[in-house]
Structures are given as structure tokens and as C-alpha cells.
Amino acid sequence: MAVETQAAQLVGPVTSPRPGSVRQAWRSFKWATWLGWVSESNWTDPWLFFIYALAKPISSALIVLVMYTVVARADVTSPLFAYLYVGNAFFQYVFQTSSGMAWVVLDDREWNRTLKFVWMSPVHIGWYFVGRSMAKVLVATLSVLVLLVFGWLVLGVKLNTVGWGYGLTAFAIGLAACVAVGLLLSGTLLLLANKGDYVSEGVGGLIYLLAGAVFPIDVLPAWVRPISLGLPHTYWLEGIRRGFVGGESMSPFLAQFSDGQVMLRLAAITAIWVTVSLLWFTYCRRRVAQLGLVDMVTMH
Amino acid sequence: MKRNWLETNLRAAWARAYVRIVGINRDLSWIFWEGVLPILSVAAYVFIYKALGAPEEYVGFVVLGGVMTAFWMNVLWAMAANWFFEKHGGNLEIYFQSPTHPAAILLGMAVGGIFATTLRAVILLVLGSWLFDVRFGTANLGLAFLAFGITLIALYGLGMMFASLYLLYGREAYHLSNMLQEPVFLLSGFYFPVKSLNFYVAAFGSLIPLTLGMDAVRQLVFGSELGWLPVPLELGLLTGLGILFLWGALWALKLMERLAKREGRLTLRWQ
């Protein structure tokens, strides 16, 4: 007893945050962000890291550019090109955030074998996954900035400077939607033995197709449109285009909504998705603990 | 002695191919995950062309490009990066301790990879053609299959060469494979005629056998208006690339063996 009292006096009061508190969430998010950044970037020097990180999104944008110029005879001043270009640029956030959170499960469980230790530590596992994906969000932000500047300076994409407040608001709400999809995916992958990478890539591809990232949703078959309208990403990209590009919407269907209606729909549908994702993630977290799957290794 | 050496290596190649021919196809869910799901990215590019009012043959380009994507991803992850993953799984030392030439293991990986990926590619091709009403010309179908076959030999030769070279890398190997996806889709003209690119860019992209292979196949099934180089020239260049990469694979194996003896780090994990 005397030793324990002396040890307590030396160590001082224990300051672990209360489970479920804001402080725990912040600490989990903060240190997971640091860990994610170190994990993503410490395999090489910074310059090479950024070259590797930017090569994919820039190539993806150039593919759309070449496809457009091949058919439309290089009319890059057309509003349709700005529509394609800006939508494709910002869609990097979906791939990086949503798929990135899913890949955290695969990386930590299969490759690093650290998930069980994180699970046992006093962190909020949901905020841990969110924080781990923030490094990819940072890389996505950098690539979007590079693409926008390249599009504006080199390709002559006309960007709208007046509506940036609207665009940034839409962007912030949509980022929450991307995180919600990421939570859905990471919760699901905690329960899946394999095929996790196909699930995350497949969901990203589905959203790319249905949200009108690189073409107006009017091109899709009519029976698919209700699904498109149920995705927050559809309104997110529309809001971003209205804010950063301006002009008339290239989608006749979405053009019927005013700016306020687009923002309202975005906020409402995002709120629904965030709620559903939190409920699903909570269920998956409990189920994983019940079934003892935290340290499941599938030799992925 | 010579016959035993040949028999041993062929049996090793078959054993390595067996996993990819039989093992991974046992779980039939691959039909959905690897055969059907990739249609989503193909569909996105198809709808881009439809939104732009592109001619119908461009839709065919996209479907073919999607099919070839499966092969390129297989070369990147199941050939080039495979030994890197085997190193971390502990199998690499077993391969080198076995009484076979490492080239036999690479051959087995390539044969198995071609078989497994072709199954998936056929599903994607049939599904994509049906969904988007793509019509392929049949007049030069035999030559198209020949072009496709030569392309695969050259492509998997490149993969075999990369498999050895990747062992020189640590974690960079994973990131390199990750990085070589979209840039290669761009340089090789997966979704548009490679003729659209600057000549020198297309020439550089031709180092990837898929560039010339896809262009040749497109010309043979959709007509030569959007082709880059004449088909006989492309087939000749592909044959040359195949020989070069297969020789390169053997050279890379020797280099790797030399480095392994000198530096003793090739089987070190978590570098």
C-alpha cells in the first residue's frame, strides 16, 4: 500500500479522458491523424512522396481532359468542360476519404497487425479511423488545389471567385458525407473476412457513376435517378460547381433547384447519411467485439 | 539430369500456376467482385462519352480499355508486387531454397495470372458489350486474337521483370504499384485512341505493351481510322518488346541473386 501511494505521488493523478467524452474524441482524432500522416509518408523523402501522391489524381484529370478534347475538338472554354473538370477534381475526396477509411481497417488488421492493440487502448475507435484517413484528405486537398490552379492557368477553366463562400460551405458539408461513407465502409470491413478492397473500390466506383462526378446525371437511365438523388455527393458536387465555377448547371434536372434548395438538400441528406453511418458503425463495433473478430487475419 | 531439371522446373511452374488456376476460383464470389463490379468504372467512362455525344466506337474503346485494365492490375499486383508480398508472408525464402530456378516460379505466376485474369476479362467483355451494345467487327478476329496473345506475352514478361526489380525496393514497391495505375491508363490510351496523344508521349507509352496491343486490337475490330501505327508494325514492335522483357526478366533475376549474396537484405521484411 505504501509503495502504491508513493508511486501515485510520483506519477500524479491519472488523466485519461472519460470514454465518450469530447476530450477522448479529440485525442483519438489528433493522434490518429499524426499516425496516419507518418504511416503514409515516412517511406520516402517529402518531394518523392508528393510526386507519388499527385501522379494519380493528375493523371485521372488528364484522362478526362483527353477524352473531352478527342470528342469536343479541344473546346476547353466550354462550361461542360469546367463541369467535368471541377467535378473530377473534387471527387478525389471521395476516393481518399471514404476508401481511405476502409483501407485503414485492412492496413491495421492485416498488414500492421495493430488493430487489436488500438482496440484495447483508450481511444474512440471511430474517431481513430477518421483521424487515420486525414492524411489522405490532406493529399486530396493538395491535388485538388494543383488541379484547380492547372485548370485555371493552363487550360483556361473559368473559375468563379464570387461564389467561393457557397462553394466552401457545400464542400464542408460534403466532406462530412464522405466521412459518413467511410464509417459505413470501415464498419462493414471490420466484419468482412475478405473482399474488403473490392467493397471499398466498388462503392467508390458506384458513387462516381451515380453522383454525376464527370457527367450530368441526366445522362443516366431514368430509373437510376432516384438513387442519384439519394446520394449527398450529387448535391455536393452540384454545390461545388455552382460555387467555384458558376453559370448555369449542366444538369437540366438539377438546374431546377435554386442554390438554397441545393444546399438544403445537401445538408438534410448528409444528416441522414451521418446518422445511419453512426448507427451502423456502432452496431459493427459491438458485433466485432461479440464475435472476437478484432484480430481476425485473412492473409489479405 | 537435363530431363529431371526440365521436369522439376515445369512441375514448379505448374504448382505456382495451380493456385491461380484452381485455388482462387473455388470461391465463386469472384464472379461478382472481379467480373461484374469493374463494370462500374467502365460505365462511368461510357457515360462521359455519351454526354459528349461521341461516336459509338468510342464506347467500344472504353469496354476494351476496361478489359485491359484487369490485365494491367494483375501485372502490377499479382506479378510485379507479388514477390514483395511473398517476402512479407515468409514464402520467398522457401522459393529460393527449393531446387527450382526462380524463373519457373515467375512462369507459373504468369501462366496462372493470364488464365485467371482472362476469365474475369471475358465476363467484363461480354457484360460490357451487352449493356452498352458494342459491336465488334469479325473480319480480322483471328489476327486480333494473335495481337492479344502477343500483347499478353510481352506484358507478363514486363511483369516478370518487375517482380525481381521490386525486391530491390522496400515499402516503395507498394506505392510504386499504386502510382502506376492511372498514369499508365493515360499514357497507354486505355479509354481513348492513343493517336490523340503527342507522338513522343505515345512512343514513350508504347514501352507498356498494352499501348500497342490495344491499338492493334482496336484497329482490327473497329477499323483503322483511329489507329496510331500500322498493325504489322505494331505486332513487330510487340514481339520485340516481348523478347526484350523476357530477357530482362532473366537478367533481373541474376541481378537480384548477385545483390542478395552481396548485401544480404533482399529477404529482410518491413523495410
Image (cartoon, grey):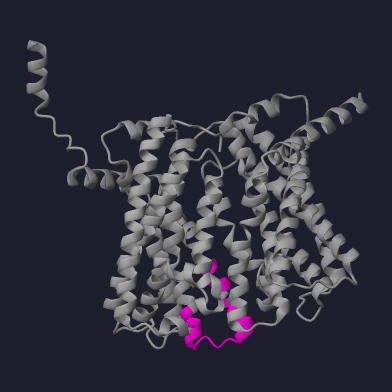
Is residue A51 depicted above or below B109 in this figure? below
Q: Split into 4 quadrants, where in the image is the N terminus of chain B?
A: top right
Q: Is residue A72 left or right of residue A183?
A: right
Q: Nearer the viewer, residue B36 or B169?
A: B36
Could you say which quadrant of the image residue A124 lies in? Answer: top left
Highlighted range, magenta: A60-83
Q: In this view, does B96 lie to the left or right of A259?
A: right
Seen at 77% across and 64% down, the residue is: B213
Q: Is residue B245 left or right of residue A120?
A: right
Seen at 34% across and 77% down, the residue is: A262
Tally of numbered discs: 0
Q: In this view, does A192 lie to the left or right of A12?
A: right
Residue A127 percent across, percent down from the top left: 30, 47
Is A82 magenta? The answer is yes
Is residue B20 depicted above or below A54 in this figure? above
Residue B239 percent across, percent down from the top left: 84, 58
Residue A283 percent across, percent down from the top left: 37, 42
Residue B68 seen in render: yes
Residue A211 seen in render: no
Seen at 39% across and 88% down, the residue is: A247
Q: Nearer the viewer, residue B81 or A204?
A: A204
